[in-house]
Amino acid sequence: MTDKIEVGQIITGKVTGIQPYGAFVALNDEVQGLVHISEVTHGFVKDINDHLSVGDEVNVKVLNIDEEKNKVSLSIRATEEPPKKQAKPQAPAKQSVKLEENTSGFNTLKEKLEEWIEQSEFKN
């Protein structure tokens, strides 16, 4: 079946079918392999149809050959350069925030703490 195909080899194939989990690619007249959705491109792929169509010619790398099950695992993203990581934007300098005391409505923790300390002193 795969006498001429080896793991690690990069081959041009033709997309023959698309499923939600991946795309089937014909490598020659006898051998067809599967590109799992996670191997279509770098990054997340929600819908494989956004990236591939039946009849597309694609470069694929042979990841695995299972002679017993007649399965060939392929990757398109392994033939592409990974995207360059963009520098993370610098976080703005930390600014100190002064909290204003708001005495309307609820007692602040500071006031309650003073009250609790006074109460505990009377009990002792």
Image (cartoon, rainbow, N blue to C red):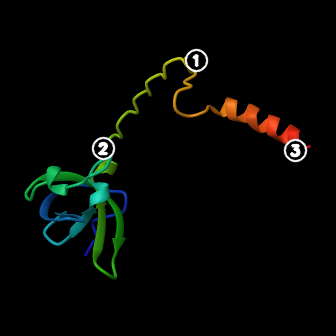
Query: For residue 74, what is the image quadrant?
Result: bottom left
Mark found first going from the N terminus, 3 or 2: 2
Q: Is residue 118 above or below residue 96?
A: below
Q: How many residues crowd around disc 2 within 10 Å: few (fewer than 14), some, or many (20 or more)? A: some
Disc sitting over residue 22 in the figure:
none
Disc sitting over residue 96 in the figure:
1
- Is residue 61 visible to the viewer in this orientation of the structure? no
Q: Percent x, y for residue 66?
A: 35, 75
Considering depth in this image, is 29 or 95 the residue closer to the camera?
95
Q: Is residue 109 left or right of residue 48?
A: right
- Is residue 29 visible to the viewer in this orientation of the structure? yes
Q: Identify residue type, mark 2.
A: Glu
Q: Residue at x 26, y 53 (%)?
A: 40
Write down the residue under mark 3. Answer: 123
Q: Is residue 12 above or below residue 93?
A: below
Q: Residue at x 14, y 60 (%)?
A: 15
Q: Percent x, y for residue 41?
A: 28, 49
Q: Percent x, y for residue 105?
A: 52, 32
Check the picture and name the quadrant holding the C terminus: top right
Write down the residue under mark 2. Answer: 80
Q: Identify residue type, mark 1.
A: Ser
Q: Nearer the viewer, mark 3 or mark 1?
A: 3
Mark found first going from the N terminus, 1 or 2: 2
Mark found first going from the N terminus, 3 or 1: 1
- Furthest residue in direction front, as rendered: 122
Label 3, label 1: how far apart the Cα atoms are? 39 Å
Check the picture and name the quadrant holding the N terminus: bottom left
Q: Is residue 79 left or right of residue 26?
A: right
